[in-house]
């Protein structure tokens, strides 16, 4: 989530004025273009510290003056910062939109881990916050469906939904060599997390080596403190020390890129993944990938509207009905990849080209467009919506495909229509958010199109504020503030 938030924050900051509010004192990474404010938890959990701060005058810790420079969009990440995002809007920025991200499927994740009661408690928090959001955002198709399901269980108004595709960093294309005897695989994931499927991958390697295949697995993700122990356990499962290399966790991008470039394929054998950024990291280099079927990455790769089937589907490893058969399923998939390696390498180059339309900047553009189409919940307080009005999907290059609004009692319309910004929409949204008007007008002037008009919401009065404090931070010169 740290990597995701950094990439998204920096992408948003290229077009907008962005403030990152965190209660993590370890947040030392630069978030280029964004203003970072850190709250001291002072003994509280990070989530509670953020929620408590949302009750205080935001100017006292560096956020914009709600009357002078209100935010257009407040983004919360799952149950961690989602409650604080909703409270900031409720207490101080009534005209802002609230987007709530779902990063994991809490019930499914904890079911796989054998602790369903924890998953139920986490899901309850997600549902509660979603009722206060204007837009629920799923990271990839799997989590978007989960966000829609959870938000529909609240019994009240339904927020709009949006499917965001995490950006792919397009790196220098790997130059694949000719036929080789040894197949080098790379697995990037925490070795102490059973959901990552590391044991299944090691058992698959042992089986392949017994069958005569020269295959080697490199695992990046062990704790330094237990590195020696993990190496011994991995060698035992893989059939010998020569079959596996275990490396410690690292945030060094150069090291991670070097791991990928030295691999013939990147594998993601997780039992469940909300999306799986490691898959697109490998694909961004033009390296073949294998991903588990129960993942957002697999759903994306299997979407023929986004990825040609002959390229995407061979990357997905079907989940066997019996979990004990996972090592066999992965051994079979790795064997096929080895037999078809030249073709898989060509496919990987084509997949890399496809993913150029799914950068972090494209994700940021689709997110802001989807969010600013919504009407803030504070403007709907006297109405109840039992039906979702819009469900958008991020297409290539940040464009939106959206389901048309459906009147209650009518059959759902299956056709999706592409949404683009028109001059009429610019004027309507501009009445509601003046800071958004200029950015949308510039885009409309460059790309004159048509769109359905959207009614401007009524203006409501914000809460009473204490006397103004001295202005904080630099003046805003870009698009809407977030």
Image (cartoon, rainbow, N blue to C red):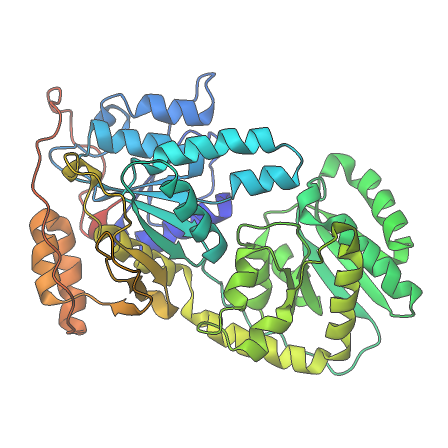
Where the C terminus falls, by quadrant?
A: top left
Query: Where on the picture, by quarter, is residue 151?
Result: top left
Q: Is residue 471 above or below residue 437?
A: above
Is any part of residue 186 visible from this angle? Answer: yes
Foreground residue, 409 or 429?
A: 409
Residue at horizontal 64 percent and vertical 73 percent from the top: 314
Q: Position of residue 47 (x, y in %)?
A: 43, 27
Residue at horizontal 33 percent and vertical 51 percent from the top: 161
Q: Position of residue 405 (x, y in %)?
A: 23, 58
Residue at horizontal 66 percent and vertical 38 percent from the top: 113
Q: Position of residue 430 (x, y in %)?
A: 10, 53
Foreground residue, 224 or 432?
A: 432
Query: Where on the picture, by quarter, is residue 468?
Result: top left
- Identity of the residue furthest to the top in this view: 43
Q: Position of residue 157 (x, y in %)?
A: 27, 39
Q: How many marks?
A: 0
């Amino acid at each position: 989530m740290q990597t995701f938030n950094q990439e998204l924050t920096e992408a948003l900051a290229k077009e907008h004025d962005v403030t990152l509010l965190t209660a993590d004192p370890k947040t030392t990474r630069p978030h280029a273009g964004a203003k970072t404010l850190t709250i001291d938890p002072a003994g509280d959990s990070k989530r509670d510290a953020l929620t408590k701060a949302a009750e205080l005058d935001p100017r006292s810790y560096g956020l914009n003056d709600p009357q002078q420079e209100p935010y257009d969009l407040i983004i919360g990440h799952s149950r961690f910062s989602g409650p604080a995002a909703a409270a900031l809007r409720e207490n101080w920025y009534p005209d802002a939109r609230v987007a709530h991200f779902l990063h994991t499927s809490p019930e499914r994740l904890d079911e796989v881990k054998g602790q369903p009661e924890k998953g139920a408690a986490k899901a309850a928090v997600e549902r509660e916050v979603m009722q206060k959001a204007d837009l629920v955002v799923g990271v990839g198709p799997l989590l978007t469906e989960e966000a829609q399901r959870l938000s529909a269980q609240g019994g009240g108004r339904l927020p709009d939904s949006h499917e965001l595709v995490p950006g792919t960093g397009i790196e220098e294309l790997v130059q694949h060599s000719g036929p080789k005897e040894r197949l080098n695989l790379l697995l990037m994931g925490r070795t102490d997390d059973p959901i990552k499927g590391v044991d299944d991958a090691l058992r698959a390697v042992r089986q392949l080596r017994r069958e005569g295949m020269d295959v080697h697995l490199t695992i990046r993700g062990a704790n330094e403190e237990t590195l020696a122990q993990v190496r011994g356990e991995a060698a035992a499962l893989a059939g010998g020390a020569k079959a596996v290399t275990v490396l410690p966790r690292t945030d060094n991008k150069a090291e991670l890129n070097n791991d990928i470039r030295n691999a013939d394929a990147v594998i993601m054998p997780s039992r469940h993944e909300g999306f799986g950024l490691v898959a697109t990291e490998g694909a961004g280099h033009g390296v073949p990938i294998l991903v588990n079927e129960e993942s957002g990455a697999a759903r994306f790769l299997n979407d023929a509207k986004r990825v040609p089937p002959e390229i995407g589907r061979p990357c997905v490893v079907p989940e066997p009905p019996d979990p004990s058969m996972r090592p066999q399923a992965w051994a079979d998939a790795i064997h096929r990849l080895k037999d078809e390696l030249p073709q898989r390498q060509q496919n990987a180059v084509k997949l890399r080209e496809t993913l150029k339309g799914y950068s972090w900047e494209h994700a940021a553009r689709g997110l802001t467009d989807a969010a600013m189409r919504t009407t803030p919940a504070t403007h709907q307080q006297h109405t109840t919506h039992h039906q979702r009005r819009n469900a958008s999907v991020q297409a290539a290059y940040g464009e939106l495909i959206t389901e048309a609004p459906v009147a209650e009692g009518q059959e759902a319309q299956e056709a999706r229509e592409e949404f683009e910004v028109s001059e009429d929409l610019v004027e309507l949204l501009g009445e509601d958010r003046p800071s958004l008007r200029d950015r949308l007008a510039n885009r409309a002037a460059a790309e004159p199109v048509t769109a359905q008009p959207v009614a401007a919401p009524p203006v409501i009065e914000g809460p009473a504020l204490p006397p103004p404090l001295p202005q904080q931070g630099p003046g805003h010169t870009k698009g809407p503030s977030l």
